[in-house]
Structure formats: C-alpha cells, structure tokens
C-alpha cells in the first residue's frame, strides 16, 4: 500500500471521527455495565469520600473502559468506516 492510499485510509473528517468516538464510548459503557454499577453502588450517598472509598471500583471501571476506548480501537473503527464508504462509492459507480 502506497503512502497516499494509507493516508487516505487513516483520514476521516472531524465530524465523522467525533461520531466514531461517541459510538466507541457508548459501546464501552455497555460492555462495562457491571463495573459501572459497582462504582455507582459504592459512590451512592458519598461526596468527597468517594475518592478514597471507591478507589478500587474506579480502577476496575477505568481498566474495563480502556479496553474499548483506546487509539487502536478508534483506528479500527476508522478503517471499517472507510471500507464502508469505499463500498458505497463503488456500488454507486456501478449503478
């Protein structure tokens, strides 16, 4: 793959990237629902003490969320988006 093709594949418009980030975050929250509930249960009724009383639950939640919200996941989503766009363009050219 040449430099130009690779650059095109990795380039997506800002609005599209924002939409992909939002989709990525929604999926992460869905996948980490168990840890979110544990953290919420711990934090319930607390104010400042939540910082040290719920530290373990926060670490677990963040660890889970990071699995689904990192640069690698975003890059994969961008590539998938570009492949779908290319397929749409190819289909419209053939019609």
Image (cartoon, grey):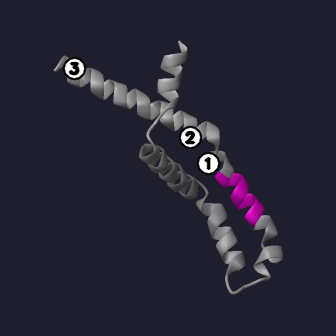
How many other residues sit within 10 Å of disc 2, few (<14), some (14-19) or many (≥20)? some
The residue range painted magenta reads 58-65
Q: Quadrant of residue 34?
A: bottom right
Q: Residues within 10 Å of mark 3 (few under 14, many from 20)?
A: few
- Judging by the rendered image, the residue that carries numbered circle 2 is 74
Badge 1 element: loop
* Residue drawn 77% across the image and 61% down it: 59
Q: In the image, is 24 to the left or to the right of 43?
A: left
In the displayed structure, 86 sits above or below 2; it is below
Q: Quadrant of the C terminus?
A: top left
- Left/right placement of residue 34 relative to residue 23 reads right
Comes first in the chain, label 3 or label 1: 1
Of all residues shown, which one is farthest toward the right?
52
Instruction: Determine whether, in the image, residue 69 is placed left or right of residue 21.
Output: right
Q: CA distance from mark 2 to mark 3?
A: 29 Å
- Asked if one can make out residue 1 in the rendered structure from this viewpoint, the answer is no
**Magenta span main SS:** helix
Mark-to-mark CA distance, 3 and 1: 35 Å
49 left or right, relative to 76: right
In the displayed image of the protein, which residue is found farthest to the left? 95
Q: What residue appears at the point 77 percent right and 83 percent down from the top-left corner?
A: 48
Find out whether the residues at labels 2 and 3 contact each other: C-beta distance under 8 Å. no
Q: Which mark is residue 69?
A: 1
- The answer to which of 68 and 6 lies nearer the viewer is 6
Callouts 2 and 1 close, C-beta under 8 Å: yes
Q: Tell me the tag on residue 30.
A: none
- On the image, the x and y values in percent for residue 14 come to 46, 45
């Amino acid at each position: 793959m040449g430099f130009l093709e690779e650059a095109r594949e990795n380039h997506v418009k800002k609005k599209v990237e924002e939409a992909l980030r939002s989709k990525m975050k929604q999926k992460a929250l869905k996948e980490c629902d168990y840890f979110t509930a544990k953290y919420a249960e711990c934090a319930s009724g607390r104010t400042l003490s939540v910082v040290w009383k719920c530290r373990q639950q926060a670490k677990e939640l963040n660890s889970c969320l990071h699995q689904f919200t990192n640069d690698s996941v975003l890059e994969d989503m961008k590539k998938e988006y570009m492949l779908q766009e290319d397929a749409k363009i190819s289909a419209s050219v053939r019609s």
